[in-house]
Image (tube, grey):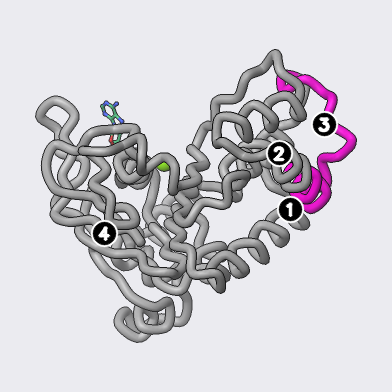
């Protein structure tokens, strides 16, 4: 479970997050917003990587600011731009991550083998990270975040670079995790992903949650047919047709 209470974050005198409050309880919660709206900043704070200016975040009841190390044990975080050790092979990296996570050898081997198979990277296990394609690096970042079977997942633009099949595999995995009661915070600026995956979405715009609810509720609320229109309405992007007509 993730609880975010009146969270604010400023860089210098620019307030990037403005009193954010919401909860994620055993569901897939989509944070939906245009570039620069504050999604990555918020997720880094929830993951204990960045300190808030004020407000509170609890992950599985643990105060993230007071005990960031314990929080890291219960979460799996896929950052927007994962940093991986370039000079290790995929197998070496996953083994290292598994050991740091305290997995027993057999368990680690089994989990690595299962994920490598699911994401179809078996043939790259002995390749250096530096030689991997963007999509395969993303798969390795995802597997690293899942190895210790975390209760809470924080996935920042996680579908980036995944091919259709891998995106489908990840989607099925997330549905399975939800069934197991895990809480998943998922950011995207791509509407179909949010619509396909999320139980609830929070639309974030200029550092504020401007709407929150089930996809259907938001569509009703904005009296539009799809989530993209809700999003455009709430983030003042509905003048897009004017922009387009000016271009032609
Ligand atoms: N370390 C930083 N220093 C100053 N400004 C930052 C920093 N990180 C992010 N920002 C600013 O905060 C705003 C939100 O950024 P970000 O959280 O990356 O948004 P999103 O992930 O929704 O695209 C942007 O205006 C960005 O320029
Ligand atoms: Mg971002």
Q: Is residue 243 above or below residue 176?
A: above
Q: Residue drawn 10% across and 29% down? A: 13
Q: Which residue is mark 2?
A: 135
Q: CA distance from mark 2 to mark 4?
A: 32 Å
Q: CA distance from mark 4 to mark 3?
A: 37 Å
Q: Does 186 sit left or right of 89 as displayed?
A: left
Q: CA distance from mark 2 to mark 3?
A: 14 Å
Q: Which residue is mark 3?
A: 125
Q: CA distance from mark 4 to mark 1?
A: 30 Å
Local packing at callout 1 (Cα closer than 10 Å; few below 14, some 14-19, many 20+) is some
> Looking at the image, which is closer to me, 229 or 190?
190
Start-end of magenta stretch = 112-130
Asked if the residue at tag 1 contacts the one at tag 2, i.e. Cβ–Cβ closer than 8 Å, the answer is yes
Kindly report which numbered mark, 2 or 3, lies closer to the viewer in this rendering: 3
The numbered mark at residue 59 is: none
Q: Does 75 sit left or right of 112 as displayed?
A: left
Secondary structure at badge 1 equals helix
Q: CA distance from mark 2 to mark 1?
A: 9 Å
Placement of the N terminus among the 4 image quadrants: bottom left
Q: Which residue is mark 1?
A: 166
Mark sitting earlier along the chain (4/1): 4
Secondary structure at badge 4 equals strand
The numbered mark at residue 3 is: 4
Picture coordinates of residue 170, whole percent (x, y): 66, 57
Would you identify the image quadrant in which residue 218 lies? bottom left
Kindly report which numbered mark, 4 or 1, lies closer to the viewer in this rendering: 4
Would you identify the image quadrant in which residue 200 lies? bottom left
Q: CA distance from mark 3 to mark 1?
A: 17 Å
């Amino acid at each position: 479970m993730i609880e975010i209470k009146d969270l604010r974050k400023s860089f210098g005198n620019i307030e990037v997050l403005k009193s954010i409050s919401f909860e994620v309880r055993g569901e897939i919660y989509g944070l939906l917003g245009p570039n620069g709206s504050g999604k990555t900043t918020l997720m880094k704070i929830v993951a204990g990587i960045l300190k808030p200016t004020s407000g509170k975040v609890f992950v599985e009841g643990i105060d993230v600011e007071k005990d960031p190390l314990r929080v890291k044990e219960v979460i799996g975080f896929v950052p927007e731009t994962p940093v991986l050790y370039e000079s290790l092979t995929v197998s070496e990296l996953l083994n290292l991550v598994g050991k740091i996570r305290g997995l027993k050898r057999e368990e680690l081997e089994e989990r690595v083998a299962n994920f490598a198979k699911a994401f179809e990277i078996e043939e790259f296990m002995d390749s250096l990270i530096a030689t991997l394609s963007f999509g395969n690096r993303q798969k390795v970042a995802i597997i690293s975040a899942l190895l210790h079977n975390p209760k809470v997942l924080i996935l920042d633009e996680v579908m980036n670079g995944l091919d259709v099949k891998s995106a489908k595999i990840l989607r099925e995995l997330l549905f399975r995790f939800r069934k197991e009661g895990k809480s998943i915070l998922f950011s995207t600026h791509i509407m179909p992903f949010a619509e396909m995956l999320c139980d609830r979405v929070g639309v974030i715009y200029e550092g504020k949650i401007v709407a929150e609810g089930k996809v259907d509720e938001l569509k009703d609320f904005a009296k539009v047919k799809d989530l993209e229109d809700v999003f455009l309405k709430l983030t003042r992007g509905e003048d897009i047709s004017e922009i387009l007509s000016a271009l032609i």
